[in-house]
Amino acid sequence: MTTPRVLQLMGAPGSPYTRKMLAVLRYRRIPYAFLTPAMAAARGLPQPKVPLLPTFYLPAADGALEPATDSSPLIRRFDRAFEGRHVLPADPALAFIDMLLEDYADEWLTKAMFHYRWAFAADAQRSGRVLPMYRGLSRPDAELAEAGQAFAARQIGRLKFVGSNAVTGPVIEASYARLLGLLDAHFRGLPFLMGARPGSSDFALYGQLTQLAAFDPTPMATTLEVAPRVYAWTALAEDLSGLEPGASDWIEAAALPATLRAILAEVGRTYVPVMLANARAVAARAATVETTVDGEPWSQQPFPYQAKCVVWLREAYAGLEAGPRASVDAALAGTGCEALVA
C-alpha cells in the first residue's frame, strides 16, 4: 500500500479533526488537495461507511482509492510514509504521553466542543447558520436555513453520546475553564505541549480549540477572559510550516515540566474516570455509563469507539520496553492517569 505524493482529503472548517489534520500537513510540508464535500462528490470519490470529516482518499492494495477517516492512525501512517518534521517523538516514553494527551483532546475536549456548540442558544444559532454554508456557499437562503435546522437537530441528538446533558454540563464547563488556566501556565514557559516543537497532541488540542477558542461565542468569550494566550496560540498553531524543529526540541519524559504534569492531572481528573466507566459499560453491554467526576455524577450513553481507545492505549503501554515503561510510570504517578494502564 503506497501513499500518494499529493494527499486528497475532504473536510470542512467547522470540523476540529479536519483542522487538526490540515495543521499536521502544513507543519510537515506534505502537499495536499483540500476538497469540500461538493468537490469530492463531483470527482466521484468513494464515501466512507460512516461519513466523518476529514476523509482522506488513499490507495488500497489494488491501487483503487479508498476512504480513511480516523485522524490518529492517519498521523502515524503519514509519519512512516513521509520523511522529516515528524510529529511523533522518537522517545517511546514521550511518544506514549503524547498519544495519551492526543486522545484526551480528541475524546474528552470534544465533549466541551459539542456541549458549548449545541447546549447554548447563541452558539447553536451561529453554527446552524454558518456550518451548512461549508457544503455549498451559493445555495439559496431558504435552503441553507432548512439545512441548518436539520443539521442542528441531528447534532443536538448526538449530545447523549458525547455526554453533554443537564447533569454533566457544569462538569464539562468547569473542566474547560481549568484547562485554559493550565495551558496558559504551560505556554508561558514552552510554545507546545511537547516542548519547542509540536507533537500529535498539540495538533489534536489545536483542532478542538479552533472551535472552542475561535468560533463558538460562549467558550470563545471564556477563553479570551481567562487565557488570551491560548486564543493566540490557536491562531499561531494553524500554520507551523515555517518552524524549523530540532531533535533536542522535545521535552524529556523523565523530566516533565510541572506545568505538563498539572495538565496530566486534569486528564486523570476527568477523561480517565469517564473513559474507564465507558469501557466497562461497553464490555457489559450496559444501557448507560455511570460514574463520578470530581464527586459529581456523570451519566451518558455508551460510546464503543472510546472503549477501543482505551484498548489501544493499553496495547501501546504494554508494548513499551522496561525502561520507557518505567519513565511513563514515573510521569503518570499521582496524576490519576496511571489508572488507565493499571
Image (tube, rainbow, N blue to C red):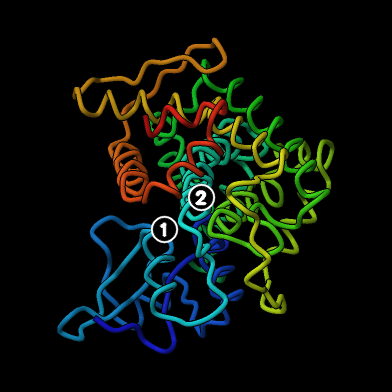
Q: Residue at x 26, y 81 (%)?
A: 59
Q: Residue at x 43, y 71 (%)?
A: 10
Q: Is residue 246 above or below residue 285?
A: below
Q: Earlier in the sequence, mark 2 or mark 1?
A: 1
Measured as percent of width and height from the top left, residue 23 is found at: 59, 68
In the image, residue 26 sits, relative to residue 335, either above or below, namely below
Is 125 placed left or right of 59 in the picture? right
The quadrant of the picture occupied by the C terminus is: top left
Residue ID at (73%, 43%):
183
Q: In the picture shown, does residue 222 fall above or below 166?
A: below
Per the image, the residue denoted by label 2 is 102
Q: Amino acid at mark 2?
A: Glu
Where is residue 319 shown, x and y percent of the image?
31, 50
Tell me whether circle 2 and circle 1 mark residues in contact (CB < 8 Å): yes
Label 2: which secondary element:
helix
Amino acid bearing label 1? Ser
Task: Measure how far apart labels 2 and 1 are at the Cα level.
Answer: 8 Å
Q: Quadrant of the N terminus?
A: bottom left
Specify the quadrant of the image occupied by residue 27.
Answer: bottom right
Report the side of 253 relative to 240 (left or right): left
Where residue 165 sits in the image (x, y, percent)?
49, 22
Residue 30 in picture, x, y percent from top left: 52, 82
Q: Secondary structure at mark 1?
A: helix
x 47%, y 66%: residue:
11
Name the residue nearer the viewer: 303 or 329: 329
Which residue, as the protein is rendered here, is positioned at the far bottom?
A: 5
- Find residue 72 and name its label: 1
- The circle drawn on residue 80 is none
